[in-house]
Image (tube, rainbow, N blue to C red):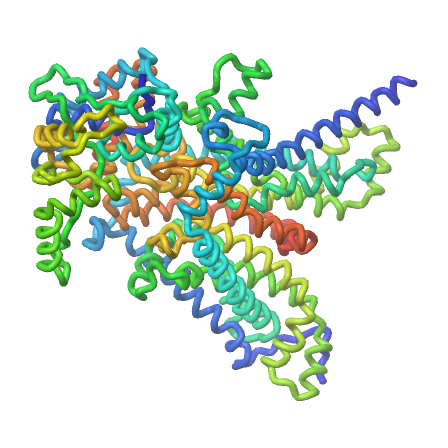
Amino acid sequence: MTSYALKQRFSSIAVYVFLGVMAFLSIFPFLWMIIGATNSTSDIVKGKMSFGEALIVNATTFFTQVNAPLIFWNSAKVTIIATVLTLLISSLAGYGFEIFASRFRDKIYTLILLTLMIPFAALMIPLFMLMRDFHLINTHLAVVLPTVASAYIIFYFRQSTKAFPHELRDAARVDGLKEWQIFLLIYMPVMRSTYAAAFIIVFMTAWNSYLWPLIVLQSNDTKTITLVISSLGSAYYPDYGAVMIGTVLATIPTLFVFFAMQRQFVEGMLGSVK
Amino acid sequence: MMAYDPNDAGLTRIIMQSAGGWYFDKDGNLAIEGNVALKAALEVIQKIQTANIFRPAAGWADWVGAFTGGEVASVTTGVWITGTVKSQPEQSGNWGIAPIPKLTIEGATHYSNLGGSSWYVLSASAAKDEAADFLNEIYAKDVNFYQKILVDRGAVGSLLAAREGEAYKSNDAFFGGEPIWQTFSDWLSKVPSVNYGTFTNEVDSVVAAHQPELAKGTPVDDVIKAINEQAQTLVQ
Amino acid sequence: MSAISSRPPRPRFDVNGWLFVGPALALIATFMVFPVLHSLWMSFQTGLGVRLSFAGFKNIYRLFNDPLFFTALTNTFIFFLVQVPIMLTLALITAALLNSPDIRFRGVLRTAIFLPCVTSLVAYTVLFKSMFVANGLVNTTLIGLGIVDVGIPWMTDPFWCRTMIIIAITWRWTGYNMIFYLAAMQNIDRSVYEAARIDGVPTWARFLHLTVPMLKPVILFTTVTSTIGTLQLFDEVSTITGGGSAGGAAGPGNSALTLSLYIYNLTFKFAPNYGYAATVSYVIVFLVAILSFVQFYVARERKA
């Protein structure tokens, strides 16, 4: 073997080791979570890395401490409402901005893009006061409303609409379809991959959101799974075993969506940067 | 040995209040510099930390885990911890209660207070009188109510008359058959009263943030000076 | 019919256009524009709770004399100055290695490294917290491997607490950024590499002098988005330091106190001072605005 070939082999081993370590470290916390769900708190804090026998106990603790069906329903409700409304309202706007020209269109659009710069911290206090004045504190509507008109999703839809074939629109017009019918019957089905990618972004954001729900949801019966996991860890009887059950259950939906729609998932994450 | 979380100022407050001190004076003004009780409390905290006679705890969960898991054999905190202690049936009979040690400054006692909940009636409330009346009837008079919440919920009330009830007179096998509620009740009447003011959380976060400096050996006076400086901007 | 393909602008009032964008505009005006202006107005007021009174520039004066604000600002800067470069370098190297067509199991490796970004910020933080407890997994492993003699005080020492948070954030976002690099790398013409390889340019030099310059725009994009994300860091530090419970410091010596967490504390943990909290929030607005300007500026340069 020549020294060049040796060097090649050595460097390719190094590459696999590096990637292997990266992949292992990325996966590891998932394993830890699953193994943790089967161990007692005292084993978890000792770092026990093998499956235990506490799964049933942990699950029982979790389901007695947490009204799980209600909490998951709350999370699902917030996510479903947010997803449906955001996709509808933001795609309408993205489509509208691209298709219909008007005098102020570009100025308003730039203004909307500028709102992307506004950090949530600058909004949360006035938003909280606004929701208080609307008597919406402690409602799921309050969680969803501020996220529905998402500048990012509008931007994403406008960018994607540029690829929407105009011939289709004009043909539909000739056939006498109204503007809303064109949107509903032609645009939406044609753009389904854009909707799928946008769905992923909105779904992930809504299911995992924390700070805003933490502020507006104040009673235990309106809380979402993210809030529950956070407060379980600082409860009077902290139980890491039960916390693990909670994180597993909270992660299953996102994992499921990821594996079911991997291509659109990556597409959604990349957004319009490509 | 006890578990101690340097990011939490609870123990500092316990020691401080046992000598009648607080972050504020009786009128609610910030009182950090020249506060004898606070200084004495921080000196104790520094001794505990530099002598390394504690099991470091990181956050509430870890702190609780230290005594429920049997790593440490004592816990110094509010009476409301009783329920957490009793969550470990296998430790039954191994626990007892004792008053906290006393500082050597003027006004020092063996008794203090930490946390708990309070009831307030807002002066702007539409049902102000009804609310006050309710609290007066239930929380200020109903001895039986206190027996019920103690048995059902492990909630300890601060109404001294509650000690006359059945539950408060019972002996607790978990604590070696001692009449712990009578004892707690005795101590309750001796806790020095202080003015908690409006900004306890603010100052508390500042004190907690400076406790790790004590562990490094920074003189208590310097730490107090730094606490005072930070607290002043927060208290407004 | 007019030329469809060139899409001439129709500079007339189109009621349909307004119907399509109307709902979004109304919502953005109510839940974005109004609050941000309200916040600006509040930043000139002071007082506790709802008893606010006009204070002029008093809050700005307070800001410059508030050691806790500077602690939060410093922490926030430490997080992005240390964490963002580490994460992006890792992401870039990983992407470059995964982009090589000779690598086997590419799909599996890519999926594995990308997987952390499906977790919620709170859930992964709780997991990391449980791994980094005093006598927990990380410390027992490090001691077992002989790397350290005694456990690292992850949760009780300011330096190690920040380190733990940086490790956690890096875990969550490296794969995410890697995907951007991979996507950009796929657009690079392979023949350039081939030519360089035949000329005997070593791998590392090809990476440094070919890949990195060609990825400049996307590197800039990820830098700006990561920095903006770090400027707003909240979920992780809030969960690590107690999940919004009252009392205590934000991490040892306030080492995990970020600007967003400080704003949250000023509003919901302390006696609420909305006015001052709004002033602190405008510091983030200001920082994000500068960064976004840089991004737009460089993006424009790219087009020209």
Q: Residue C177: x and y, percent?
A: 62, 42
Q: Residue B211: x and y, percent?
A: 30, 23
Q: Is residue C277 left or right of residue A264?
A: left
The quadrant in which the N terminus of chain C is found is bottom right
The answer to whether any part of residue C36 appears in the image is yes
Image vertical order of residue B66 relative to residue C68, above or below = above
Q: Residue placed at 31% from the left, 32% from the top?
A: B86
Q: Number of marks in the image?
A: 0
Q: Residue placed at 25% from the left, 15% from the top?
A: B219
Q: Quadrant of residue A34?
A: top right
Q: Residue C3: x and y, percent?
A: 72, 79
Residue C118 or residue C173, whichever sits in front: C118
Image vertical order of residue B44 relative to residue A103, above or below = above
The answer to whether any part of residue C73 appears in the image is no
Residue A216 or residue C69, whichever sits in front: A216
Q: Residue placed at 8% from the left, 31% from the top?
A: B189
Q: Quadrant of residue B79?
A: top left
Q: Residue A203: x and y, percent?
A: 55, 56
Residue B27 or residue B41, whichever sits in front: B41
